[in-house]
Image (spheres, rainbow, N blue to C red):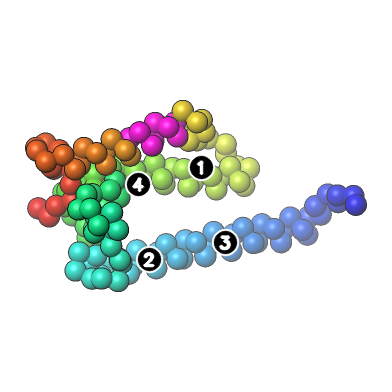
Amino acid sequence: MAFDAPTPDRRLRHGWRERAALLTGMGLAICGLLVLHRFNPAETPIFGFCLLHRVTGLHCPGCGALRATYALLHGNLAQALAYNVLWLAAIPWLAYETVRFRLAQSGRWKGPSLLASPRSTWVLLAVLLLFGVLRNLPWPPFTWLAPHPI
């Protein structure tokens, strides 16, 4: 079975599918942010709960991220930082990686990935683990890393 080179028509259809998938993903993300903007995760049970915190009382590295996003959507940067400072630091990085990935797929730009090497992946895991441990220590300044209202 021989492989046929893609014809311009097949490339056009493939590009349409990619754009449709991108627009669908963006639409779902916007809908999710609109729901999050409307409903406070600290007061509404529709968002679920952190199983680790419910069972052990410990805060995982992601605890407070929804509340931080809610506060950020309402323009309250100080409260967002109090809920999860690591999540707020990760938002620009995630935005960069998303744009870089999409542009690399389309062939328009192949910028450096911040997770291109196994070493950077291990560094990211170490940062998550260290943040998870530090935010559960019972004395200041580490208690400030645990999610808290201000």
The span shown in magenta is: 120-127
Q: Could you tell me how far apart the alpha carbons at marks 2 and 1 are, in whole angstroms?
A: 22 Å
Are the residues flagged by discs 1 and 4 in contact, CB closer than 8 Å?
no
Q: Could you tell me which residue is drawn at 22 percent across and 67 percent down?
A: 40
Is residue 126 covered in magenta?
Answer: yes
Label 1 sits on what residue type? Arg
- The picture places residue 14, in percent across and down from the top left corner, at 69, 58
Q: Could you tell me which residue is drawn at 64 percent across and 62 percent down?
A: 17
Please, what secondary structure does the residue beneath circle 3 have? helix
Find residue 32 and name its label: 2
Q: Could you tell me how far apart the alpha carbons at marks 1 and 3 are, in whole angstroms?
A: 17 Å
Please, what secondary structure does the residue beneath circle 2 have? helix
Label 4 sits on what residue type? Ile
Left or right of residue 79: residue 92 = right
Residue bearing the label numbered 4: 91
Residue bearing the label numbered 1: 100
Left or right of residue 98: residue 57 = left
